[in-house]
Image: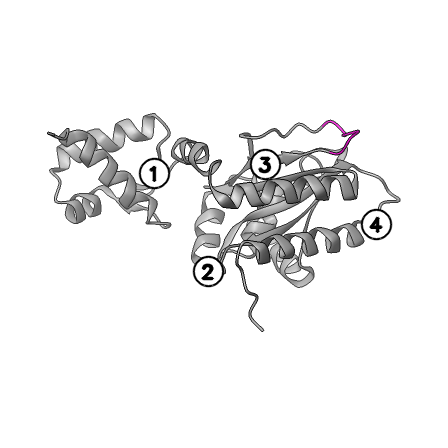
Amino acid sequence: MKLNRTTQRTVEILKLVSKQPDGITLDELCEKLLLPKTSAYDIVTTLAEMGMINVDRGQRQRYTIGLTAYRIGINYTNNLDFISVIEPELKAFAREVGKTVFFGVCSDHDVVYICKSEPENPIITTATVGTKNPVYCTSLGKAILAYSDTATRDQVMGRIHFRQKTERTIMSAESLLRELDKVREQGYALDAREMEEHMECVGAPVFGPDGSVLGAISVSSLYKPTEDYEQLGRMVSAKAAEVSKILGFLEKI
């Protein structure tokens, strides 16, 4: 069977871009894949227009994997074991805490929600599966970012454009870094009405077998001054650790 050459090149480019967390230039793509520059440029321009890759327009344009490629991947991962493991755990946890529970992952400088479980009488939340929100004002995003490796964290933070959501929203990289230090110290992250004035969320990281951050679990509910968010944070952290262990993560002693 004869394979289409352009399609082959497109897949090769996507594979290579997906392995470069700091991005890759057009010249580097051409060198590694032995592609003519004109052909490679046409392909990456089309991929960027379709959201399959992102373009960092600095001194030299660099390409990273895009949200559309990730969303396509979600349709595959929905059939994978780790999703089937996480979902019943989220459902049980939602019943236990009586609040809405999410599992999300990072895509560029946003969080994408890929699982959601609600208690019997849920509080309406704006986040739905497949939607995305900024990492800097969500408990999911902060939990993931705090436990990501330095290179990934620096790359994500370099792409953040801080925008005011409420009067409590973090608005600078310096403030966010201080917040991430606090997250690592306590083991969970708070969205202290930073995304929506009436909502408070608590999140904690979930790790894979190799110790890298797969995503995070969060609990979301209407803000209550009487709520013990430190206790809720410890519960979310314990559940995230439990899920990580089920997925094969062995915490280093």
Give the residue at mark 3.
Answer: 115
Residue found at x 52% / y 58% = 248
Task: Name which of mark 2 and mark 4 comes first in the sequence.
Answer: 2
Judging depth in this view, the residue of 80 and 148 nearest the camera is: 80
What residue would you read off at disc 1? 57
Amino acid under disc 2: Asp
Dots 4, 3 in contact, CB < 8 A: no
Mark 1 vs mark 2: in front: 2
C-alpha span from label 1 to label 3: 33 Å
Q: Main secondary structure of the magenta part?
A: loop
Q: Which of marks 2 and 3 precedes in the sequence?
A: 3
Residue at image mark 4: 228
Q: Secondary structure at mark 1?
A: loop
Mark 2 or mark 4, which is nearer to you?
A: 2
- The magenta-colored residue range is 119-124
Q: Which mark is residue 143?
A: none
